[in-house]
């Protein structure tokens, strides 16, 4: 019997599938992803992780096997115990086992289980039928010169506020224009003195009207009568339940030495309080999402410690 087949079936329906006496497979929903460099889109999915400290029998896997294989619950529990014993024997002899459609389990130098999930199966039923795809890059052209030309040609109309002074200026302008008309009808031999005086008065009126228009432009540009209310943003504290573990030590001084070494190497190392197994864990760093922690763990395994493993726990 392939127990990994039944675990895979349950991962579609549940967030946690526990194998009694061995550990638990956990799932976390990851939203759709976009890789800008490759223009690739990935649908939402369930990320699978493993926790070797959760070993209690919750009855989920045993009941599923009993119903599928038409056997009693007690026999299913015995079958699970035999399969777990086989897995542990393979881990001891070969150092690794492969669970179909789930992932690989390996023993590191400190005899801790390191889980590497497979990406070939998406356990999120809401994404059924969705696959990743690559979209060609969108090319955009900005016609800067044409935009600037349109901005220069676009008219800007201002409507000045009506005031008594502006009416007086308009009256004066009308009087001067009327005088100019009368002088024009009187013939070419009109007095040149009056013509010069009319031109000067008209220019003065135009200057005053221009100043009023400029004042209106400044008020319309720099004065805001109803400012928007102040917005206060509250930033929620981010939880970081994913930790890349450097090791767990029975002697606290060894944990301190490991912590000091990681700090000297530039890691954001942390020491965790003594756990129920009497060990003092030391972590390279903590992360808010599973994908970030998985990426950091792989880099650490390549550069510093091939035995680094992932712990999922809110500290």
Image (spheres, rainbow, N blue to C red):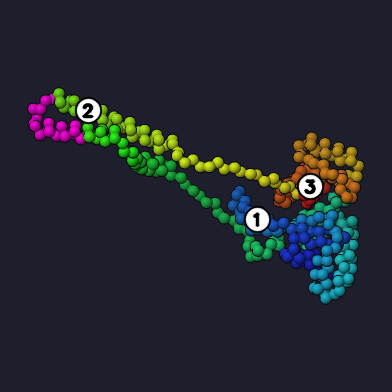
Q: Which residue is mark 1?
A: 31
- At label 1, counting other C-alpha atoms closer than 10 Å, the crowd grade (few under 14, some 14-19, many 20 or more) is few
Kindly report which numbered mark, 2 or 3, lies closer to the viewer in this rendering: 2
Magenta region: which residues?
A: 174-192
Residue at x 59% of width, y 56% of height: 134
- Residue 315 numbered mark, or none: 3
- Residue 201 numbered mark, or none: 2
Q: Is residue 40 above or below residue 206?
A: below
State whether residue 295 appears in this view.
no
Considering the image in quadrants, where does the N terminus appear? bottom right
Residue at x 67% of width, y 46% of height: 236
Question: As drawn, which residue projects farthest toward the top?
Answer: 193
The answer to whether the residue labelled 1 contacts the one labelled 2, judged by CB atoms less than 8 Å apart, is: no
- At label 2, counting other C-alpha atoms closer than 10 Å, the crowd grade (few under 14, some 14-19, many 20 or more) is few
Residue 224 or residue 107, whichever sits in front = 224
Say if the magenta span includes residue 176.
yes
Under circle 3, the secondary element is: loop
The answer to whether the residue labelled 3 contacts the one labelled 1, judged by CB atoms less than 8 Å apart, is: no
């Amino acid at each position: 019997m392939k127990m990994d087949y039944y675990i895979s079936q349950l991962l579609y329906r549940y967030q946690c599938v526990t194998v009694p006496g061995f550990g638990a497979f956990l799932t976390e929903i990851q939203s759709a992803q976009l890789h800008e460099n490759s223009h690739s889109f990935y649908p939402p999915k369930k990320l699978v992780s493993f926790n070797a400290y959760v070993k209690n029998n919750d009855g989920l896997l045993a009941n599923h096997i009993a119903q599928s294989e038409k056997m009693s619950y007690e026999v299913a529990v015995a079958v699970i115990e035999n399969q777990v014993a086989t897995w542990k024997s393979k881990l001891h002899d070969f150092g690794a086992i492969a669970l179909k459609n789930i992932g690989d389990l390996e023993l590191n130098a400190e005899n801790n289980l390191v889980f590497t999930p497979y990406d070939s199966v998406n356990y999120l039923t809401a994404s059924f039928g969705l696959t990743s795809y690559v979209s060609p890059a969108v090319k955009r052209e900005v016609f800067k010169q044409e935009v600037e030309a349109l901005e220069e040609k676009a008219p800007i109309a201002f409507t000045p506020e009506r005031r008594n002074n502006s009416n007086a200026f308009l009256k004066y302008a009308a009087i001067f224009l009327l005088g100019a008309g009368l002088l024009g009808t009187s013939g070419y031999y009109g007095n040149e003195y009056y013509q010069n005086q009319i031109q000067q008065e008209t220019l003065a009126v135009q200057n005053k009207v221009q100043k009023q228009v400029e004042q209106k432009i400044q008020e319309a540009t720099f004065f805001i009568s109803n400012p928007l209310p102040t917005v206060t943003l509250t930033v929620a504290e981010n939880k970081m339940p994913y930790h890349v573990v450097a090791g767990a030590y029975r002697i606290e001084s060894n944990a301190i030495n490991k912590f000091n070494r990681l700090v000297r190497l530039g890691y954001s190392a942390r020491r965790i309080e003594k756990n129920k197994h009497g060990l003092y864990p030391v972590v390279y760093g903590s992360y808010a999402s599973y994908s970030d922690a998985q990426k950091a763990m792989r880099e650490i395994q390549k550069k510093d410690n091939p035995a680094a493993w992932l712990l999922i726990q809110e500290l």
